[in-house]
Image (cartoon, grey):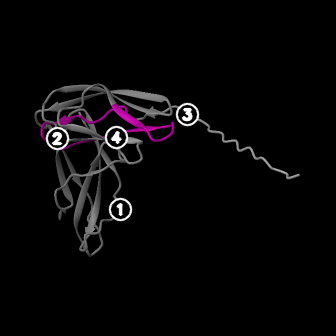
Amino acid sequence: MKSHSAFLLLVLAAPCMASSIKIQTTAVPNGILKDSYYGVITATGGCTPYKWKVASGSLPAGITMKTSSSTTSVTLSGKPTTAKTYSFTVSATACGHTSQVSYKVVVQKAENHVVDLSWKASTTTDVVGYNVYRGPDGKSWQKVNSGVKASTAYTDSTTADNSTYYYSTTAVDVNGKESKKSNIVHSTIP
């Protein structure tokens, strides 16, 4: 008599039991008509990938929302085309949990304030200039100068009312290599 062995393969599929998702960003910067706009909304918790959407209202005309490669954040960017107040709610969903936060962005016709920045020159002999970076949260950055700045000063005239901006600089050498970012400073515009 032949003996047959039988195997039972039991596969257990566990649903994502991660904690709830939470959007951490409570405010995004205001904007200026036809100037570059940059804002970041981040979330934590749950399990990736996150699904983002504008749940109600609308983004400022000319601004688009793009999900990061990790899906844990979205970038709002573009050039506002209409000066007015926009209200919208953004939602992020993961593992069956949803988080929503409402935002208000005022797009001004023109800037009312400037931020004057200055820093100490690099002591490295092969430095040819500097780049200036601005961000909404001290973590996400966008270069604001169009070319390498030879001076150790920069005036940012594209700031919107009731917004906080974070700044950092890098030194650029003769080969175009950038240093690490400098210490971060911030300016709150009234």
Decide: marks 4, 1 in contact (CB < 8 A)? no
Q: Residue at x 45, y 41 (%)?
A: 49
Q: Which residue is mark 3?
A: 19
Name which of mark 4 and mark 2 comes first in the sequence: 4
Q: In this rendered view, identify the residue nearer to me: 94 or 108.
A: 94
Q: Amino acid at mark 2?
A: Lys
Name which quarter of the figure residue 25 lies in: top left
Q: Which residue is mark 4?
A: 74
Q: Amino acid at mark 3?
A: Ser
Q: Residue at x 21, y 37 (%)?
A: 63
Task: Tell me where residue 164 appears, x and y as whole percent.
Answer: 29, 39
Q: Which residue is mark 1?
A: 180
Decide: marks 3, 1 in contact (CB < 8 A)? no
Q: How many angstroms separate mark 4 from mark 3 (CA)?
A: 20 Å
Q: Residue at x 32, y 49 (%)?
A: 185
Q: Which residues are magenta?
A: 25-53
Task: Tell me where residue 180 appears, x and y as whole percent.
Answer: 35, 62
Task: Tell us which disc is closer to us: 2 or 1.
Answer: 2
Name which of mark 4 and mark 1 comes first in the sequence: 4
Name which of mark 3 and mark 1 comes first in the sequence: 3
Q: Relative to residue 7, is residue 132 depicted above or below?
A: below
Task: Tell me where residue 90 appears, x and y as whole percent.
Answer: 34, 30
Q: Relative to residue 65, is residue 2 depicted above or below?
A: below
Q: Amino acid at mark 4?
A: Val
Q: Which residue is mark 2?
A: 79
Q: How many angstroms separate mark 3 from mark 2 (CA)?
A: 36 Å
